[in-house]
Image: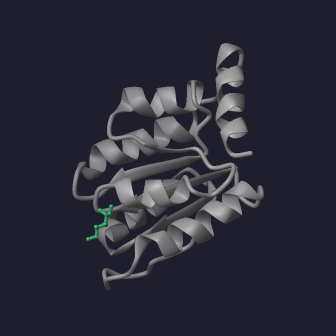
Amino acid sequence: MKVAVGCDHGGFHLKEAIKGLLEKQGIEYKDFGTYSTDSMDYPDVAKTLAEAVAVGEFDRGILTCGTGIGIGIAANKVKGIRAALCHDTFSAHASREHNNANVLTMGERVIGQGLALEIVDIWLHTEFEGGRHAKRVDKISAIEE
Ligand code: RB5
């Protein structure tokens, strides 16, 4: 599995912690930045990362900002992206099983690092259930046409 990770200044420390988890699990990843806590605009990194996921260069993307909201809204503007904001383990499971989310977003100012890493672990290792959910995800894609 190839994973793309990215953040703005508000999500920098969480992104670094996520990279540590990916390294521990031997998961290949690319860091799309930002690379410090210097202020930057989250739509810039969201667009670059989401486009790379949408064309299939990466299997999944993980984006962090202060809240996980702005960066997720921006990522969802890219065709083919289903970005899910998950700050609990139930949503992490459901966003994969039901929505086939291909981008996970989280907010460093919202969630503790321990829970955030548990969510990443669940989200990366949970498969889409398909079946009745596939029809619904197809309907989401149809909205993009
Ligand atoms: C940056 O201050 C903050 O607005 C950003 O990280 C994010 O929370 C936006 O949704």
From the viewer's side, name the closer residue of 143 and 66.
143
Residue, far bottom = 38
> For this view, does 11 lie left or right of residue 57?
left
Count of numbered tags: 0
From the viewer's side, name the closer residue of 64 and 74.
74
Does residue 58 appear in this view? yes
Residue 75 sits in quarter? bottom right
Coloration of the structure image: one colour
- Image quadrant in which the C terminus is located: top right
In the image, residue 41 lies at what x, y percent?
40, 77
> For this view, does 133 lie left or right of residue 38?
right
Does residue 30 appear in this view? no
Ligand 1: quadrant of the figure: bottom left
Residue 53 sits in quarter? bottom right
**3 versus 91 height, above or below:** below
Q: Residue at x 36, y 54 (%)?
A: 68
**8 versus 138 height, above or below:** below
Q: Residue at x 57, y 56 (%)?
A: 77
Q: Residue at x 49, y 60 (%)?
A: 74
In the image, residue 112 lies at what x, y percent?
23, 49
> For this view, does 95 lie left or right of residue 88?
right
In the image, residue 46 lies at what x, y percent?
52, 66
